[in-house]
Image (cartoon, rainbow, N blue to C red):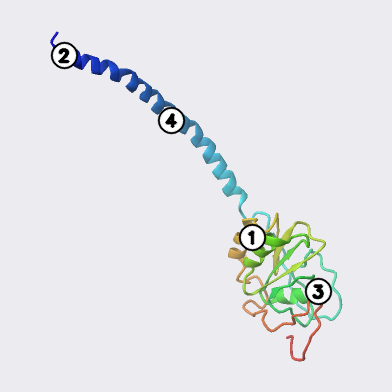
Amino acid sequence: MSETEAENDDRTARRSPVLLVLSVVVSLVLLGGALAAPLIARVAGYEAAAVDLGDVRTWKIEDTRHTDDDVDYPQTPPAGGPHAPVWLDCGVYDEPVRDENAVHDLEHGTVWITHDPSLTGRDLEELAEQLPDNGIMSPREDLPSPVVVTVWGAQLALDGARDPRLRLFLEEYGDGHTAPEFGVTCNGGTPDPTGAVPEPGIGA
């Protein structure tokens, strides 16, 4: 055997263990990816299925009478029905608002976000940031969940300010199309959460 042939054999011998190790590593990586892919797909599918509007409750509400009386609404918060002649001005309220006035807002196509009073700090800020211009937000004691978003005839109980379903609900219902007076703004209502009118001429 020539000296050149011997050197080639030595290099081949040295490369063989390295190539073997690399082959094993590549095989393990490919195997791991193959095993992980179904799991990743299942997780992604679960998350996609979980973030939907399947829990939205809807009602056909045709009674739009004005009344000065208190109303016993079947939903909490109410999602429509007889209501006060005066609506609430758009915006964020730091105390509970009167149902009968808020329902007048719903008649205008307003989004009403209610939250447990214990929601504070950054959670409260994030919730307010998601409130549409044609919306009101207020605390409420008797909610079935930490946050509830309501439009006329539709409502969704949420797990909190970061619940991704809020965005989906607003995309679907935030334009107010379910309301009897769809397209009417909540601007110009009373800023008093009790529904009191500070000056004449508010309400229609």
- The answer to whether one can see residue 63 in this image is no
- Residue 142 or residue 123, whichever sits in front: 123
Residue indicated by mark 2? 5
Residue indicated by mark 1? 166
1 and 2 marks in contact (CB < 8 Å): no
2 and 4 marks in contact (CB < 8 Å): no
Which badge, 3 or 1, comes first in the chain's sequence? 3
Q: Position of residue 108 (x, y in %)?
A: 68, 77
Q: Quadrant of residue 22?
A: top left
Closer to the eye: label 1 or 4: 4
Q: Residues within 10 Å of mark 4 (few under 14, many from 20)?
A: few
Which badge, 1 or 2, comes first in the chain's sequence? 2
**Distance (Cα) linking label 4 and label 3:** 61 Å
Closer to the eye: label 3 or 2: 2
**Looking at the picture, which amino acid does disc 1 mark?**
Leu
- The answer to whether one can see residue 55 in this image is yes
Which badge, 3 or 2, comes first in the chain's sequence? 2
Q: Is residue 32 above or below residue 8?
A: below
Residue indicated by mark 3? 98
Which badge, 4 or 3, comes first in the chain's sequence? 4
Residue drawn at x 63%, y 57% as measured from the top left: 165
